[in-house]
Amino acid sequence: MSASRPLHAAFVAAAAAYPDRTAVVEPGRASITYAGLERLSDRLRDHLLVCGVRPGDRVGIYMRKSIDAVAAIYGILKAGAAYVPVDPGAPPARNAYIMSNCAVHSVLVEARVAERFRAELEALGAAVPLLETGECGGGEALSALLEALDSAGPAPVAENVWPGADALAYILYTSGSTGKPKGVMLSHENAVSFVDWCSETFSPTHTDRFSSHAPFHFDLSILDIHVALKHGAALVLIGEEAGKDPQNLARLIAAERISIWYSAPSILALLAQFGKLARDNYPHLRTVLFAGEVFAVKHLRTLCELLPDPRYYNLYGPTETNVCTYYEVLPPVPPERTAPYPIGKVCSHLEGRVVDEYGAEVARGAEGELCISGRGVMQGYWALPEQSARGFFASADGRRWYRTGDIVVEAEDGNFTYRGRRDRMVKRRGYRVELGEIEAGLYRHPQVEEAAVVAVSDEEAGVKITAFLSCKEQRALSLIEIKRFCAENLPLYMIPDRFAWHAGLPKTSTDKIDYQRLKEMA
Amino acid sequence: MEKLVERKEELKAAVKEFILREFLPGEAAENLTDDVQLISGGILDSIATLKLVMYFEERYGITLEAHEVDREHLDTVHDIVELLAAKQ
């Protein structure tokens, strides 16, 4: 239904329709109107074009979540380039790898990290021009950068560039099984078809106020930013530290009159348990969306009891397709229910089918891998033709289907239920975690003889990760020692919940570690 | 002065007991010394830290400020005891 258009076009139209409305809010600090955001992103476009950015180029964003970063996104899109957002809190070496991997034209980067970042880029032999800003916030850092560039010679006012529906709009890097992040390439058409599906399904208006909880390098941010700013709504930026203080976050949701909330379930579980939600009223909150992992039913039940009025939607989809199925949870959650809710039906801009290991469709009710086809599906992984090819199969009618790697079952009513992974990836607090990466980390300990990591679903935590270890010496390491070792070698969200020491790990008849047996033991 | 020292010993025992029971089941008590790093050592993640805070807030009827719920204030048994003692 949606005509082919650039991802930024709906924002440009909203800015013309609602110039004086608030576009983006940094709570307690600053806000910017639609006209202001339009101007700021136009000026960045003009300078990027002067710097030589051409359609199809990539431009990196290494900035904290801020009005400046939102303006950067639209400035880059308007210049006809794709934006590549990275985690401002990640090690500069990782971000340098990403920027050099997709050969960005230039990077907008905050000065506080610029020096280390430049050194890491040089170590990789990548010569990338850096556009340095001060500490981002309120749009002032980007404004100051543009002022400085203007003083060297103002950029002529240009038109927005439309590189075509198949041109890349952004690249999001996710955890790769090899240990190197891989870049998921999404085009304007991919993004616009998803944004339009959101419009159809959630009917946002210019009076809505969207939360922006996910960081901009997560695909949840695509809904937040581009759906909110398509409709003239306000986008309320929520800082990373929100999870540390659920009570404060609850007050913020009330005070900022958030009407559409979207996040991973883990933060909602924290709000339900520790947010003292009963202290405030949330009359504006009409829609609660969650995605990224299974929502433990126990906490979802508590949340629905505390906040019975909004509509709740379980959204599902890998970064490669963005949201591809959705399910409305109707409160109350029955007290006897322990099974997670279904992931639901395939979104209207996509098609789904469930296939066996040979790619043949399975009968309804049988387990199989969910595959997705349609306008929202990524083009592939940046510079990884083999992995991209493995990610797809073609059906007899020539359509390409993305293999999600997720095993599902279709129920009589057409809703899909998530059963697990085909491979060894799990989701934890919204992060993709490859179990093999944890094992590789554990093997780095000199005393570890064997390491095998399994994940089992858990009502409380969603998923519990257990590490089975055998030791080269008699004395098993203490829990404190092994946890400290993990904290030094793995991201915190990868540290196993439980450690079990055995004299030797159980083996199959071919002398491989018996994961099935370990799962039963966990 | 003596009272305060006694009080801190009580607090320390309570904090250690709670951490061992909730987050280090099976660990020998003597391994949890006053200076074991809890947050940076991977023992307390963000949810565990909140659970610990909620438990002691309720047990002692005190309130910790949001900025206190971090590595700087809660990374060791020693830090936790000092913070709890200052609140009483």
Image (cartoon, coloured by chain):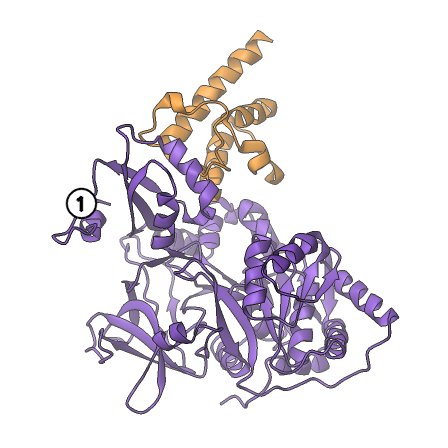
Q: The residue marked by circle 1 belongs to what chain?
A: A
Give percent across and percent down for residue B86: 61, 23
Left/right of residue A159 with respect to residue A505 in the rendered view? right
Is residue A219 in view from this perspective? Answer: no
Say above or below: A123 vs A391. Answer: above
Give the residue drawn at x 28%, y 71%.
A369
Q: Circle 1 is placed at which residue position?
A: A506
Q: Nearer the viewer, residue A46 or A125?
A: A125
Give the residue drawn at x 22%, y 70%.
A367
Disc 1 secondary structure class: loop
Give percent across and percent down for residue A70: 66, 67
Image quarter for residue A385?
bottom left
- Visual hue assigned to chain A: purple
Image quarter for residue A326?
bottom left
Left/right of residue A138 with respect to residue A227 in the rendered view? right
Say above or below: A45 vs B48. Answer: below
- Visual hue assigned to chain B: orange
Is residue A186 in view from this perspective? Answer: yes
Give the residue drawn at x 63%, y 86%.
A162
Say above or below: A330 vs A357. Answer: above
Give percent across and percent down for residue B17: 40, 25
Q: Nearer the viewer, residue A400 or A408?
A: A400
